[in-house]
Every structure is written in C-alpha cells, then in structure tokens.
Image: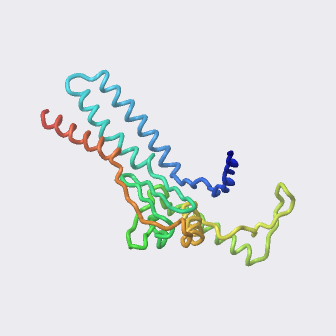
Amino acid sequence: MTTPDQQSPAPQPSRPTTRDRIYRSPMGLVGGVLLLALAGWLGIDAIVAGEGSTPWLALASLLLVVPLVVAFTVRPAVYAGEDRLRVRNPFRVIVLPWGEVASLRSGYTNEVVSKAGDKYQLWAIPVSLRARKRAARKEARRTQSAGGGRSRFRGAGGLMDAGVHDGPVRAESDQIIHDLRQTLEAREKAKTAQGEVTVRWAYEIAAPAVAGAVLLAILLALG
C-alpha cells in the first residue's frame, strides 16, 4: 500500500521588517577620529622611540585614553526600531520597548524616561543652544512673513510660496526628538513593543580603561 504524499504547509508570509533608524553625532565622530589619530601617532612614536620607562608609560596611557575617547565620541548612538529604542551610551546599552517609554524630554540635554521613572541621557543626540536660537529666528521670520501675506519667489520649479513648510522650524536635535515622539505615539500600544527595560554595562570599554589606569598608576609610583 502506498500512502499519499503529505502536502507541505503553505508558506506563511513573513512579517515586514524595517531597519532601525540610527542617530549619531557627526561632530562627535569627527572629533573622536581626530583624537584617536593624534593619540595613536604620539603613543606609537613614544613606544618605538622612547627610552627607559617611556614606552611603558605610553602604552598605559593608550590603554587608558583610547577606550575613553571611543566611549564618549565614536560609541554613542540611538537606534529607533518598530518595537524598541536602543540607546548606546559611553558605558551602558539601554534597550527600552516602546511600551515602557513614558516620555522623551528635551532641555539642556535629551533624555528618555521609562515608566518606572528611570532617566537615560541620549548622548548621541546632543543639544545645541545656538542651533535652537537660529531655528527660533527662522521660525519668527517665517511667522512674520505668513502674517503679512504670502511672499513668492522664483525657484527651480517656477513661482513658489515662501511661507509653505511642513511644520515649525526646529533645530536638528529637536526635530529628532519630535520624530521619536511620533514613533512612540504610534507604537507604544503595539503587542510586539512590550517587554522589560534592559541595561547592560560596556565592560569592553571599561576593562581596558581600568587596566590602563592601574598600570599607569603603578608606573608613576615606581618612578
């Protein structure tokens, strides 16, 4: 007797996924790369050409300085996905499902507040008071122009209204926080956006820095 071949189940449609939006500080990245290049140049030169305890002091200094520079300039980033907000700060990585985010605040610093009341600073999205003042002046001019009637100017596509904009003029960091708040409003009640807040310490950054500090202190104590 032969048994009929079992039919394979119909393939289930995969859930559409979107890539996380990544926010970083361009000036922080540029400054960090320049500092790392300078530290590497001076440190390697001292290790190769130094005499006595100089090479060891240079090595200990590099172990201390390089992780700290990476931590505060290159490492910070904010990843905004459909279900969670992942904050990578100098020494911690915080993962907050949107359902656990209470608010996003923007003052002298940008921070996210969990429903448990914990606050986490967004190092990758620094606040620029100068950019805020510049945006406020642009918004004031736009409002004044709109109040006095629409002015028209000639652009690439012909005559255009100078007062037509999508929302108020904001500084870049404030616009990012505004976008994150919109994502929070849209996703905070989604089933896939629930869970617990997790915090992980960046031992890969802290361990070399501590080792460098201890080695440097021993070398200085020995003279």
Q: Nearer the viewer, residue 144 or 78?
A: 78
> What residue do we see at 67% from left, 70% from top?
167
- Direction from residue 141 to residue 70 in the image, left or right: left
Furthest residue toward right: 158
The answer to whether residue 203 is left or right of residue 35 is: left
Q: Which quadrant holds residue 148? A: bottom right
* Nearest the eye: 163 or 36: 36
- Count of picture labels: 0
Name the residue rendered at 82%, 63% in the picture: 153
Q: Quadrant of the C terminus?
A: top left
Query: Which of the 4 image quarters holds residue 143?
Result: bottom right
The figure's colour scheme reads: rainbow
Rendered residue at 25%/40% (across/down): 211
Instruction: Please provide percent x and percent y for residue 196.
Output: 42, 65
Please tell me in which quadrant of the rendered image residue 158 appears: bottom right
Position in image of residue 149 (x %, y %): 79, 76
Q: Report the front residue among 179 and 33.
A: 179
Residue at the extreme front: 1
Percent across and percent down for residue 173 are: 54, 61
